[in-house]
Each structure stands twice: as structure tokens, then as C-alpha cells.
């Protein structure tokens, strides 16, 4: 039974990693950091899957890019993407999923809790991306914040509303196995 749960967790993670790949192709160039559909997918992953299954989805997504598949925004691949200007955002997906899924595991998924949990995860993820810009682009903390955080606040809030709507819609129609709990 435990091996069935593990297999199911990897299958769900694979399916949601594929959704993340598709959403990463929705890109609007916005300076050195593009506006993408990635965080929309990450919010959906964090809201519907368990912590571990969500982390597996992010791991698979990053692994696909590392081995050379054009899965990231702008079809970038490999270590260049995972160490370049957007690396802090990509690695921040783990933190977003972990914090948000953990928070939601302990609460009833109302629109308000979904929004607040995702807001928390997305702010931490954006902060990680901005902090990474101080290293990758040698920006001051202020310039990194103005470049990597501020332009994404309004689009991020819009995406959070979309996450809540999509998650509510999916939750009403589909019961995901391993969709809640501690796995």
C-alpha cells in the first residue's frame, strides 16, 4: 500500500510538473526578469498537493530544465538558468510550495486561507528571487527589490486571485488522491 501511495505521489507530481512547464511558456518580457505563468502553476501545485508531492513536482520541473529540456520561461535550460538572474525565483518555487502547502494542510481551504497562504509563499519566493539578483547581477539591495519585486506585486496579486478561483473550481469537481495530509 505504501508503494502505491509513493507511485501515486510521483504520478501526480509528474502531471503537475507538466502543467508548470506549460505555464512557463506564458511569458511577458519585463526587463531582466520576465512575467510568467510559472507562479500561477506553483500556487495551484501548492494549494492542491501535499508538501512532499508538491516538492516532487518542483524537483521534476527543475530536473527537466537541468538535463536540457526547454521548460523554463524563455525556453532557457541547464545550469545557466539555475544559476543565472532567474535562479532565485526558480529555487524559490520549493519554498513557495513548502510554506503554502504546509500552511494549507492545517486549515480549511476557504478562499481567504488559499489567498493568504499563497500570498505568504509568493512573497517569500519573490524575496528570494530579488535577493539572488544582488549576487547574479551585482545589484544593490534597493535596486534588486525595485527590479525583482516591485514590478511583480500587482501581477502577482492578480495571479493569486486566479489561483484561488482555479483551486476552488478543481476542488469542487475533482478529489485528488494525496491532495491533503502530510505526504
Image: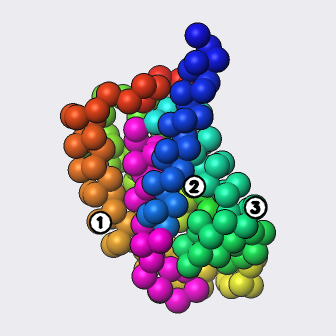
Q: Where is residue 180 in the image (x, y as percent from the top left)?
A: 43, 27
Tell me the residue at 41%/34% (across/down): 104
Residue range of the region highlighted in magenta in the rendering = 25-48
Classify 10 Å Cα crowding around label 1: few (below 14), some (14-19), many (20 and above): few
Q: Position of residue 46 (x, y in %)?
A: 46, 44
Tell me the residue at 48%/47% (across/down): 16
Helix, strand or loop under label 1:
helix
Residue 46 lies in the magenta stretch? yes
Residue 33 position by quadrant: bottom right
Q: Of callouts 3 and 1, which one flags the residue occurring earlier in the amino acid sequence? A: 3
Which of 2 and 139 lies nearest the eye of the viewer? 2
Residue position for label 3: 67
Classify 10 Å Cα crowding around label 2: few (below 14), some (14-19), many (20 and above): many
Tell me the residue at 28%/32% (across/down): 174
Q: Of callouts 3 and 2, which one flags the residue occurring earlier in the amino acid sequence? A: 3
In the rendered image, the quadrant that contains the C terminus is top right
User: Tag on residue 93?
Assistant: 2
- Label 2 and label 1: CA atoms lie apart by 18 Å
User: Tag on residue 158?
Assistant: 1
Residue 6 position by quadrant: top right
Which of 78 and 149 lies nearest the eye of the viewer? 78
Helix, strand or loop under label 3:
loop
- Label 3 and label 2: CA atoms lie apart by 18 Å
Residues marked 3 and 1 touching at CB (< 8 Å): no
Amino acid at each position: 500500500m505504501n508503494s502505491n501511495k509513493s507511485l501515486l505521489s510521483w504520478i501526480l507530481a509528474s502531471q503537475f510538473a507538466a502543467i508548470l512547464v506549460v505555464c512557463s511558456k506564458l511569458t511577458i518580457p519585463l526587463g531582466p526578469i520576465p512575467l510568467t505563468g510559472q507562479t500561477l502553476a506553483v500556487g495551484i501545485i501548492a494549494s492542491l498537493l501535499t508538501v512532499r508531492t508538491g516538492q516532487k513536482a518542483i524537483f521534476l520541473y527543475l530536473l527537466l530544465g537541468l538535463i536540457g529540456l526547454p521548460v523554463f520561461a524563455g525556453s532557457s535550460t541547464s545550469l545557466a538558468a539555475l544559476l543565472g538572474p532567474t535562479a532565485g525565483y526558480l529555487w524559490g518555487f520549493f519554498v513557495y510550495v513548502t510554506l503554502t502547502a504546509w500552511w494549507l494542510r492545517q486549515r480549511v481551504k476557504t478562499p481567504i486561507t488559499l489567498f493568504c497562504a499563497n500570498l505568504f509563499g509568493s512573497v517569500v519566493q519573490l524575496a528570494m528571487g530579488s535577493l539572488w539578483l544582488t549576487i547574479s547581477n551585482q545589484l544593490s539591495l534597493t535596486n534588486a527589490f525595485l527590479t525583482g519585486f516591485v514590478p511583480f506585486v500587482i501581477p502577482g496579486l492578480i495571479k493569486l486571485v486566479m489561483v484561488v478561483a482555479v483551486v476552488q473550481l478543481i476542488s469542487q469537481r475533482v478529489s485528488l488522491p494525496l491532495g491533503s495530509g502530510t505526504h
